[in-house]
Amino acid sequence: MIGEIDYPALAVFISFFAAVTAMGFAAAHWRRPKTLAHLDEWGLGGRQFGPWITWFLVGGDIYTAYTVIAVPALVYAVGAFGFFALPYSILVFPFVFVVMPPLWKVARENNYVTAADVVHGRYGSRALELAVAATGVIATMPYIALQLIGMAAAIHALGLKGEIPLGVAFVILALYTYSSGLRAPALIAFVKDAMIYIVVAVAIGLIPLKLGGYGAVFEAADAAFKAKGSGGILLRPDQYVPYASLALGSALALFMYPHTLTAIFASSGPDTIRRNAYLLPAYTIVLGLLALLGYMGHAAGLKLSDNNDVVPALFKILFPGWFAGFAFAAIAIGALVPAAVMSIGAANLFTRNFWKAYVNPEVTPHGEARVAKNTSLVVKIGALFVILFLPTQFALDLQLLGGLWILQTFPAVVFGLFTGWFRAPGLLAGWATGFLGGTWLAWANGLKPLHTLTFGDNRVTLYSGLLALAANILVAVLVNAALRLRDSRRGAPSSAGAVK
């Protein structure tokens, strides 16, 4: 789909990208504190974001290149199965409503910046803290890589060849994140969401009209799937369980990521989080409408070598250059915002839970901020290596791979909020089982997210991340029960030994 440069599209794209870049650097002066040389200010925006800003920031974290590029690409390739993102983005918000306010309260009262801080404070275990922190950084790499894939798809659709344009966008992202911290993506999120809503409104209104209506779109998609002998616009019975497992596993994983927790910790209070929990499902409507673009690709007769090109290709062939440039800018900016927050979240983890814990326990707030800034640059470079060395057919596989890993932090982060029964050794053993076992499953399945279990003549296919989490929890329960049994025989106290 790369051809001659579309100069009107390129001009509009550069104009919006330049405006957002200027906003990113100007954000250092927005709600300016006495200094940004403090992790609370650089990495959490001063913990002062109210409902309005938090709504855009959390929405910007969740609805990313994953939404605009990866989900339509999967729907284009496999049909109805790609819509698993809709139920998962609905399931997650009751979880946020219940779990995130108490987590925010613990973090605020103890000046915690990361989930690993919370775990160390709860269980007093450096080993478990390091496991949670390392998992957060590793899981974030493929998610940032997905954002870079989205940016690359938009840039290549303009007719720009090679990787230099993506490299330039990468450098710009790195510089304004370094300069402004979390304030940059928080401010840009307003523009990003407005642009995405405009693009979606135009797409769902005009593209079907150009293609003969929604009836024609569904008929064309159905015919295309039947012609290639796979996929379909309806789920097959054997897809029900894997579809549900992907939805559930993805929902449990989403708010374990460093970037979503960073947005939660940056909010001004529990009420802000609860309000967002019942307002954010509005984004799910946008997600469903964007997913339909995968079907529209078949109705438009697209023949693509890369499924990730379906949305840029639709705008390129069906709209004038100036609006295509606007859409490509929305896609690129929609990747920049979460990529910035992701790198900040990973940098916070490294700074607090590795550098301060093991390298320099006496580091000053100014030193923490400096380490976090430098780490945010390294994390982005790591994401580039993910793109280069991980063979994934779909960009969505990157997000699901990260989800498998980050799911293994769920017991350590969440269980301690509601019970004192678990102990650090049990949770650490569970984490190791889930992380290593889940990684092996992913590798054995060619980095695909699903694994099939065979029970005699019966076969069940499930999300590998959910299987790994089940093993994680089982091992944690067994080890913890064994420890308690040992202590009871010795007459030792049966408390969890947690640090409140």
Image (cartoon, rainbow, N blue to C red):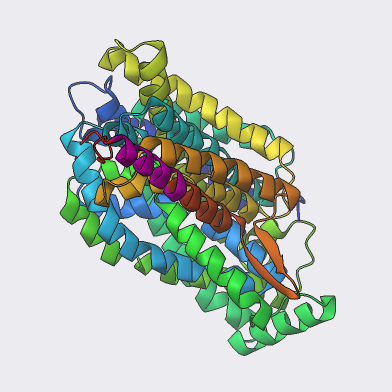
Q: In this view of the protein, which residue sits in the foreground, 483 or 82? A: 483
Image quarter for residue 370?
top left
Q: In this view of the protein, which residue sits in the foreground, 9 or 416? A: 416
For the stretch drawn in magenta, the main secondary structure is: helix
Question: In the displayed structure, would residue 183 be above or below residue 301?
Answer: above
Could you tell me residue 136's position as x and y percent?
47, 37
The answer to if 195 sits in the magenta stretch is no
- Res. 440 in view: yes
Q: How many labels does the image show?
A: 0
Q: Which residue is drawn at 43% across and 65% down?
A: 89
- Res. 177 in view: no
Image quarter for residue 493?
top left
Image quarter for residue 28?
top left
Could you tell me residue 292's position as x and y percent?
58, 73
Could you tell me residue 109's position as x and y percent?
16, 36
Residue range in magenta is: 477-490
Q: Which residue is drawn at 26% across and 22% down?
A: 38
Q: Residue at x 26, y 59 (%)?
A: 98
Could you tell me residue 203's position as x and y percent?
53, 71
Q: Residue at x 21, y 41 (%)?
A: 106
**Split into 4 quadrants, where in the image is the N terminus?**
bottom right
Question: In the displayed structure, would residue 362 be above or below residue 104?
Answer: above
**Split into 4 quadrants, where in the image is the C terminus?**
top left
Q: In this view of the protein, which residue sits in the foreground, 342 or 97? A: 97
The answer to if 483 sits in the magenta stretch is yes
Question: In the displayed structure, would residue 130 be above or below residue 417?
Answer: above
Q: In this view of the protein, which residue sits in the foreground, 246 or 327? A: 246
- Residue 340 lies left or right of residue 450; in this view the side is left
- Residue 351 lies left or right of residue 139; in this view the side is left
Question: In the displayed structure, would residue 477 be above or below residue 214?
Answer: above
